[in-house]
Image: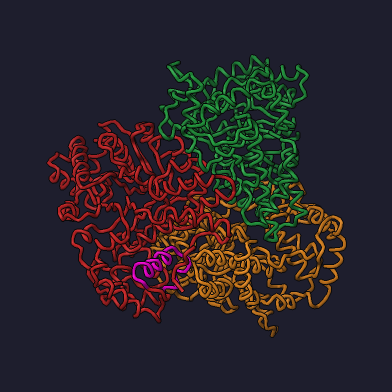
Chain colours: A orange, B red, C green
Amino acid sequence: MPLTDPDRLFSSDPKLRSTARSLFESVEALPILSPHGHCDPSWFAQNARFPNPAELLVIPDHYVFRMLVSQGVPLTDLGISRIDGGATETDPRKIWRLFAQNFHLFRGTPSSMWLNHSFEHVFGLDMPLSADTADQYYDHIDDKLSQDAFRPRALFDAFGIECLATTEGALDDLKSHKTIKESGWSGRVITTYRPDAVVDPDFEGFAANIEAFGETTGEKATTWIGYLNAHRKRRAFFKSFGATASDHGHPTARTENLSASDADALFQKALAGTCTVEEADAFRGQMLTEMAKMSLEDGLTIQIHAGSGRNHSQQVFKTHGRDMGFDIPTRTDYVGGLKPLLDAVGMEPDLTVLLFTLDETVYGRELAPLAGAYPSLKLGPPWWFFDSFEGIKRFREATTETCGFYNTAGFNDDTRAFCSIPARHDVARRSDCAYLAGLVETGRLSMADALEVAHDLAYGLAKAAYKL
Amino acid sequence: MPLTDPDRLFSSDPKLRSTARSLFESVEALPILSPHGHCDPSWFAQNARFPNPAELLVIPDHYVFRMLVSQGVPLTDLGISRIDGGATETDPRKIWRLFAQNFHLFRGTPSSMWLNHSFEHVFGLDMPLSADTADQYYDHIDDKLSQDAFRPRALFDAFGIECLATTEGALDDLKSHKTIKESGWSGRVITTYRPDAVVDPDFEGFAANIEAFGETTGEKATTWIGYLNAHRKRRAFFKSFGATASDHGHPTARTENLSASDADALFQKALAGTCTVEEADAFRGQMLTEMAKMSLEDGLTIQIHAGSGRNHSQQVFKTHGRDMGFDIPTRTDYVGGLKPLLDAVGMEPDLTVLLFTLDETVYGRELAPLAGAYPSLKLGPPWWFFDSFEGIKRFREATTETCGFYNTAGFNDDTRAFCSIPARHDVARRSDCAYLAGLVETGRLSMADALEVAHDLAYGLAKAAYKL
Amino acid sequence: MPLTDPDRLFSSDPKLRSTARSLFESVEALPILSPHGHCDPSWFAQNARFPNPAELLVIPDHYVFRMLVSQGVPLTDLGISRIDGGATETDPRKIWRLFAQNFHLFRGTPSSMWLNHSFEHVFGLDMPLSADTADQYYDHIDDKLSQDAFRPRALFDAFGIECLATTEGALDDLKSHKTIKESGWSGRVITTYRPDAVVDPDFEGFAANIEAFGETTGEKATTWIGYLNAHRKRRAFFKSFGATASDHGHPTARTENLSASDADALFQKALAGTCTVEEADAFRGQMLTEMAKMSLEDGLTIQIHAGSGRNHSQQVFKTHGRDMGFDIPTRTDYVGGLKPLLDAVGMEPDLTVLLFTLDETVYGRELAPLAGAYPSLKLGPPWWFFDSFEGIKRFREATTETCGFYNTAGFNDDTRAFCSIPARHDVARRSDCAYLAGLVETGRLSMADALEVAHDLAYGLAKAAYKL
């Protein structure tokens, strides 16, 4: 019995299933556009083998280790490194076994679908993972990883990826991207401009980062004008490595549109480390509007990922640092927050601002009405905890009636788990086709229209929104 | 192939479909009660022909032009007038073509269902609207509009409307309603008392409006007592033109129950234009309670439409004014907001307060628990962005288990798009029958009970809640 | 025709129905664990007959009388006692008739499912309740109640209850529990430590309660140290009557982790009755953290029932007092509120904190991400307005993808309506099996796994979370 059902995610109702299957067959083989994610570009620059199953599938995936931690497994037992350099498990097989014996925790979760998809379709496994099969799995996958066909570039091609965007900080030298570019390899791996470290006054080492920002760009980055010019130069540099978008991870959706002198005053406070919580938020908000204005100059699409409360557990943050699975969503206000930006540039038809949220309550109340009015706005796909069957279903059901399909931007896998990319696009395409089948079979969409929409959701809308 | 599926909105599951169809057949032909909406009474007073397809179906419908604007079509290209009198498109055929070539944007939206329903069932068209068929559509509809059978009164009868409520401001002379009344026409078109312009200190020209309010009523409307009496007189005047309800569009659900002297002090500030944002909100809140108290005297049902943030785009508001599709919902607190009103009159069994929301998160958390306890409260149907299949489904699923069906108030089409009225009631009746079929087929409601409930949802509850 | 459909709550789709039925058959006969509820322990201590149908099924059930009140039936007509001792209806048959003639109000609600289940499966009735059958119902049920098989202990056994937890205040002498313990009866009825009256500065008579708390425990409970020790002693006393959990009904999810001196200062203010609203909330929040710390000592599971705004109607509260169906949910912040507690003890694998909410918007945004990360947190089942088919469906759909099944805690009936216990567990088991069937039939869960999960949801998870 295979690990994955060929009709997975399609309704068991025969008419819905058959319609969904027809729609899916029309998009299943389309190339993958991955316009936003967190793969490591060095994989493709160096094309070295992935070290072992644990380091490929467990340790880097906070979806996975978070669930084990939530049931009492210590982070150190999973090989997650400590800030103080203290001991953590180093035997990948032991880590793998711990993962395998707890695999039942993932029942009903997208992680289980993604992992089983990878096990079956990437590695050719067909028995369920459990404590009993842990070693068999480990040996099998480890053996595969030693083969050339499982090196990063080969997998990239095998996955049918047409374009993959990574995400780099504003100070990154894009060395790996340079290596890729110069290597002659045909795979299209592009970067994304993510300036949080030089935009967020609360970021560790903000003032030092701005200093480095000035050195890198030859601008006097401690002045407001020089600082903005430094951004312009770095955006151009990122564009030269394929970037078509910037990305901004902010705790709120606040924007501001201050005068240059007010903005400068805030910037000087940020440099001096004297911003209040409120002023830091205002400065980040000002920078979203500045980025949007620069997008009008250079054409980059702007992505706003708002509403993640980072590093909720003090203890985990102290011991293990950032991105340890303890980022928790918070209630987010887009209607009030975005108004200054939208009053400044919201009616510009040539600007593309993509909105992401971790607060599903805003889909119908805020995001769809905004995107269904402002020409500059489009909705990014369900993000993080919500890029799953139910998450996609809720997104479509809550937004389509108000803003249609053409104010949305296709799918993002947004992952650092490389092997899950085909699985995630498979889930998204199936989920969208299941949704479309429901519209067709309840007389809300013709099959001819549904076929066009299915193609747009799987491919066309992402291509347009990200100018790929 | 018809534009509308005869089984539209019913599940494709054979049992659910057949049960939904049986329920729908029992209510399909019931007369339409339209107890809240924004049709222009002059249509029925003058009974002139509708000028052309664009002015009938595109220009007045902010659901429609909003979507085109969201994809970069300038408002002026759609013939939307400018405040400064600047040029806008005046050729209705050009506007129609622009609409037709963008009709794919409406895929999956209720606008597409409503429009296709009108095209087929009002105008007898059966090919899909597109750039290719734009002129054919235009000519066909324009020809129909020139026929007597397509004049407003004839359509009113053809649509099977038993009663249609329009909405007029407190200062309106109700001239069109007078004309209708005196015309001897049998159609029942009634008005609704909507006093926002003399209740909201933030309304343009508030003080001048109060002056006019005094002149119209012969009351000294700048004193608190005179002002309340002016309301009483206008309510009576509106009642003489059939009004059975008042309606209140407020940004929040706040209410107050101040002493007369505190209320008067606030009123004087409002007249002087010195209210803070907070005081203006308090004054509006006080007036909701005053209106509820007057309802105890004169029997008008009170409708509270709370939570719309009006005119979000500064630029659109400056260029084109109000109601341009840029009203965006905001988070709304009913539990705290309504407490003063409810403490004052909430337990009165003879009072009917209908609550509407644009914040679906309050259905289960706030509105259904409130309506399931207070005798005066009933829930208005899903409003604006949510009077659609999915919107109605979410409303029923989130409210029925807590407050049942009998604390809800039937359907409102709430439209200014006259031709969409049968389509909207068709969608509501089908959506409710689909929901009821689900209850029947999962053993939660007997078929005998479902038939009674279907009738109540389509007809009886609106008749009772609005005393029609 | 039976009142209850044997396949109720299962999809009408044949595959889904058959899978759901198979899953349900595997758990249908499992014993009932009722680890949280509000049954009166004196029923089982005295084992007297229930007085009459109205006092068994109408008067104590605020779900039921609330609905009648919402349609204009006065509380006094339903026999609800008045604080001033004023007259209320005393004839149980009259009350029953009023209930029966309004039974249509419950169409589509869980109350209707629970009541029909009791009518049929507890009392053997099979015609619908209505005005016409009211007397027949009354006589039939009253006759049953006079039989020994319908006394509390006999019903407890007939219902298949393995363990039932009641809830008592910190000052309760647990007399009934003592009687039960000494009676030799084999039924397992345990208590739960609910200290709201000595934890909430806003509780009526807080200072007097603390005085009594000191007397009961022999501690100087007006000092911070003595107060905490008094809690320790009472927790131990409750444990001696089987308690495995404490329970906390707080208006917010706020927690604090103050120094002992700051906590003491707040406590002294609370005793003096001088706490601000904000300080009272802080004190309650501090006590949640104290309780969690004591749980690390004594092993009690801690339940947080947050977000109910109590006694919304001033008039009803004045006339009839607490718990009269006018408790209305409010928006609740768990991410910010719980942080101090979680920073203190959240990573402890031996602590079990169960979170409950009346704000469904937090399922996906806050609760599932928190429970899917912190080892101490688990999600309690849908509560109060939401322990229904749709409520359970939304809970599973919104939480499973993020925190799986194993960070949830099985079902609570949380009822004071004894006869509804089997009905409520029946609804929960069916709803969960219907949900699992959906996962199986869309390829998201294997049938083998689903069978294990069904058992865990019906039995295993509650047993583990409450250490039963």
Tell me: residue B46, above or below residue C233: below
Q: Is residue C319 above or below residue B59?
A: above
Give percent across and percent down for residue A77: 80, 52
Q: Nearer the viewer, residue B289 or B64?
A: B64
Say left or right for B425 vs A238: left
In the image shown, does C238 or C108 lie closer to the viewer?
C108
Quadrant that contains the C terminus of chain C: top right
Q: Nearer the viewer, residue C137 or B198?
A: C137
The quarter of the rendered structure image containing the N terminus of chain C is: top right
Q: Which residues are magenta?
A: B102-124
Rendering coords of residue C40 (x, y %): 63, 23
Quadrant assignment, res B42 = bottom left
Task: Decide: is B3 above or below B188.
Answer: below
Q: Nearer the viewer, residue C467 or B367?
A: B367
Q: Main secondary structure of the magenta part?
A: helix
> Quick check: A351 left or right of B244?
right
Does residue C349 appear in this view?
yes
